[in-house]
Amino acid sequence: SVGGGTLSPANAVALINREKAAVVDVSEPEEFSAGHIASAKNVPFAQLEAQLPTTIKNKALPLILVCAQGQRAQRAVAVAQKLGFTNVQAIAGGMKGWRAADLPVKKG
């Protein structure tokens, strides 16, 4: 297991459905438009610190971070925690893992 707050894509789906988790995709805009999770908001990693608090106002809500492969989202967890988000995890394998699990992808 990867450890350090990673979620399998299936567990991420459960959190989104059950607990109304917020999803933030830290990929670049062109990666985001190539395919993302339907409910995801795009906040590129470089802008995370500045934009996350205004994008997701409820810091107690479960927050799921995702990127193309998983590495940036993993780093983004630490940024979100520093900003005061208490329940934050990254999707293991990013959108690559999400697609591999045959989960729905929205384009555009």
Image (cartoon, rainbow, N blue to C red):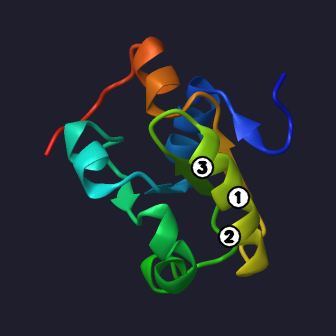
Where is residue 105 drawn, in percent x and y? 28, 31
- Figure label count: 3
Where is residue 91 drawn, in percent x and y? 61, 38
Contact between labelled residues 2 and 3, with CB atoms less than 8 Å apart: no
Residue on which the image places disc 2: 80
Give the vertical position of 92 relative to 85 (above or below): above
Label 2: few (<14), some or many (≥20) within 10 Å? Answer: many
Q: Residue at x 58, y 24 (%)?
A: 10
Residue on which the image places disc 1: 77
Question: Which SS class for mark 1?
Answer: helix
Which label belongs to residue 73?
3
- The quarter holding residue 81 reads bottom right
Contact between labelled residues 2 and 1, with CB atoms less than 8 Å apart: yes
3D distance between C-alphas at marks 1 and 2: 5 Å
Lateral position of residue 36 relative to residue 27, left or right: left
Where is residue 68 drawn, in percent x and y? 44, 37
Q: Residue furthest front?
A: 46
3D distance between C-alphas at marks 3 and 2: 10 Å
Question: Which SS class for mark 3?
Answer: helix
Amino acid type indicated by mark 1? Val
Amino acid type indicated by mark 3? Ala
